């Protein structure tokens, strides 16, 4: 007898597959040629089968309602990590990435007839295919890019005039023609964002404020600028217009590196004003308690915070949350998709900005919105594996940009920048730390002590300097 794969799974799901198999074979007068799952189900009563089969548990990111104005978390790694660090987990991570980004690519006109890579070898005509970039190396007047799918791989010659910004581990579409062992690219296609979508604006002025990189506990923390910020957000300083804006702020999003941390970089101990990591969070909690209770604070971790360093990062654990006694703080992971008053926001600390700056010609970490645009074009926050940013082998790729955000906010590089791309408002939120010796060595050029506020009535951003 032959047994189909789904019938094997059925037997395994019963927990007593071998005993059951022996029983029904013994009781049958006529043995079937092929054993299917339907045949097995007919052999026992349906209700007994249902009792034996256990449903597969699927972890789904929680949707958390916070207030009447409509705050919800759309996706967050917090509480949903399945990472065990096994090789199989890495395989599942990249498989998930390839499958999801391939679907996005196939929606592009040029990719609707894309074929698997193995079929490229059989064609002498112009053809389209999709692959994950395995390697990129320089060639005469261009690049040699190795791409692979689940079955095969091929080398692609890409002229620099076509594209010089291909990075490892991104998923691309290639339109070209095979010449010997090479596929000569005519064009490179990325998942990209769709055309600008309509935004849900509010009927009255409401504001969201964005800041990042407080680095509480550092000797370089800008206490004077923070005090000015606190006075303003409490409506006690600034011009009449600025005070009115402060009164209408409903949310404050803090985009990571909330404390300076301990042991983050060589020689950091000489830069610490507070050497105990717990006392750093205690001081952070005290500073955030100065913000009016009516403002909901959304607090995200970064690479200096006491969470796992690999992306995606979960929200702070309970022992850290207990320092924050205010009821107006919501803890989120990095990255996190959320919705506020119908506006979709993607908040990401931005560790991979440095990876893009080092791998993509013409990119500079001190011009972060240009790099954020490249993330949106690739529909991925951190495609490069093995770079500055470490990636956790989750079975699902939480760094894919599948929701189209209205606002995309990062931090990390201590620069204040605002731009837009295809209707997405891009913000790199300012820091509250002056330049350290280590940052100078890393070519960080801080633009600290500023808050970016966005009016949800007209979607206009403004920068308030302190």
Image: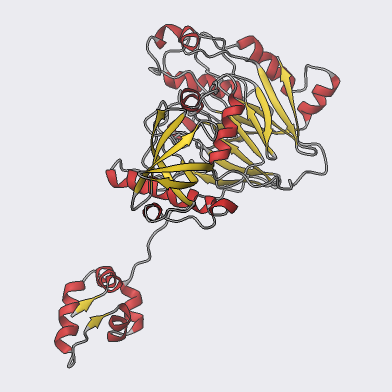
The residue that appears at 50% across and 43% down in the rendered structure is: 400
The relative height of residue 20 versus residue 316 in the rendered view (above or below) is below
Counting every numbered tag in the picture gives 0
Pick whichever, 184 or 203, lies toward us.
Answer: 184
What is the x, y in percent for residue 208? 70, 33
Where, quadrant-wise, is the N terminus in this rendering?
bottom left
> What is the residue that sits farthest to the bottom in this orientation?
29
- Residue 24 position by quadrant: bottom left
The relative height of residue 376 versus residue 361 in the rendered view (above or below) is below
What is the x, y in percent for residue 79? 44, 45
Pick whichever, 49 or 459, lies toward us.
Answer: 459
Q: In screen coordinates, is 212 left or right of 264?
A: right
- Residue 138 position by quadrant: top left
The residue that appears at 76% across and 38% down in the rendered structure is: 456
Where, quadrant-wise, is the C terminus in this rendering?
top right
Look at the image and tell me whether residue 309 can be seen.
no
Pick whichever, 176 or 134, lies toward us.
Answer: 176
What is the x, y in percent for residue 446? 58, 14
């Amino acid at each position: 007898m032959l047994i189909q794969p789904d019938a094997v799974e059925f037997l395994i799901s019963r927990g007593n597959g071998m005993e059951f198999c022996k029983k029904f074979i013994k009781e049958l007068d006529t043995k079937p040629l092929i054993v299917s799952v339907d045949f097995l189900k007919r052999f026992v009563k349906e209700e007994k089968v249902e009792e034996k089969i256990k449903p597969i548990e699927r972890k789904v990111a929680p949707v958390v309602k916070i207030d009447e104005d409509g705050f919800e978390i759309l996706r967050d790694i917090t509480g949903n990590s399945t990472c065990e660090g096994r090789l199989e987990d890495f395989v599942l991570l990249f498989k998930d990435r390839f499958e999801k980004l391939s679907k996005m690519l196939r929606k592009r006109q040029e990719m609707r007839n894309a074929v698997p890579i193995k079929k490229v070898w059989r064609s002498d005509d112009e053809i389209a295919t999709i692959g994950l970039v395995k390697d990129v190396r320089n060639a005469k007047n261009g690049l040699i890019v190795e791409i692979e799918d689940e079955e095969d791989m091929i080398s692609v010659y890409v002229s620099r005039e076509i594209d010089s910004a291909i990075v490892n581990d991104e998923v691309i579409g290639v339109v070209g023609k095979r010449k010997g062992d090479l596929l000569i690219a005519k064009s490179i296609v990325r998942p990209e964002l769709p055309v600008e979508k309509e935004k849900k604006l509010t009927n009255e002025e409401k504001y969201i404020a964005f800041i990042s990189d407080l680095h509480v506990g550092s000797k370089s923390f800008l206490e004077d600028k923070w005090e000015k910020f606190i006075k303003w957000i409490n409506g006690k300083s600034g011009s009449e217009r600025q005070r009115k804006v402060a009164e209408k702020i409903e949310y404050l999003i803090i985009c990571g590196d909330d404390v300076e941390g301990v042991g983050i970089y060589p020689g950091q101990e000489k830069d610490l004003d507070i050497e105990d990591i717990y006392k750093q969070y205690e001081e952070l909690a005290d500073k955030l308690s100065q913000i009016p209770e009516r403002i909901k604070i959304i607090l995200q971790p970064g690479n200096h915070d006491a969470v796992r360093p690999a992306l995606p990062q979960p929200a702070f654990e309970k022992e850290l949350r207990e320092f924050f006694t205010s009821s107006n703080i919501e803890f989120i992971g990095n990255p996190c998709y959320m919705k506020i008053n119908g506006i979709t926001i993607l908040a990401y600390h931005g560790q991979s900005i440095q990876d893009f700056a080092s791998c993509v010609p013409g990119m500079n970490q001190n011009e972060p919105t240009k790099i954020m645009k490249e993330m949106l074009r690739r529909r991925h926050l951190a495609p490069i594996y093995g770079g500055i940013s470490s990636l956790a082998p989750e079975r699902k790729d939480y760094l894919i940009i599948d929701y189209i955000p209205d606002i995309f906010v990062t931090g990390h590089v201590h620069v204040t920048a605002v731009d837009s791309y295809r209707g997405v408002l891009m913000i790199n939120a300012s820091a509250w730390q002056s330049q350290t010796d280590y940052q100078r060595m890393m070519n960080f050029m801080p633009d600290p002590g500023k808050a970016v506020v966005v009016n949800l009535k007209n979607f206009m951003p403004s920068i308030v300097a302190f």
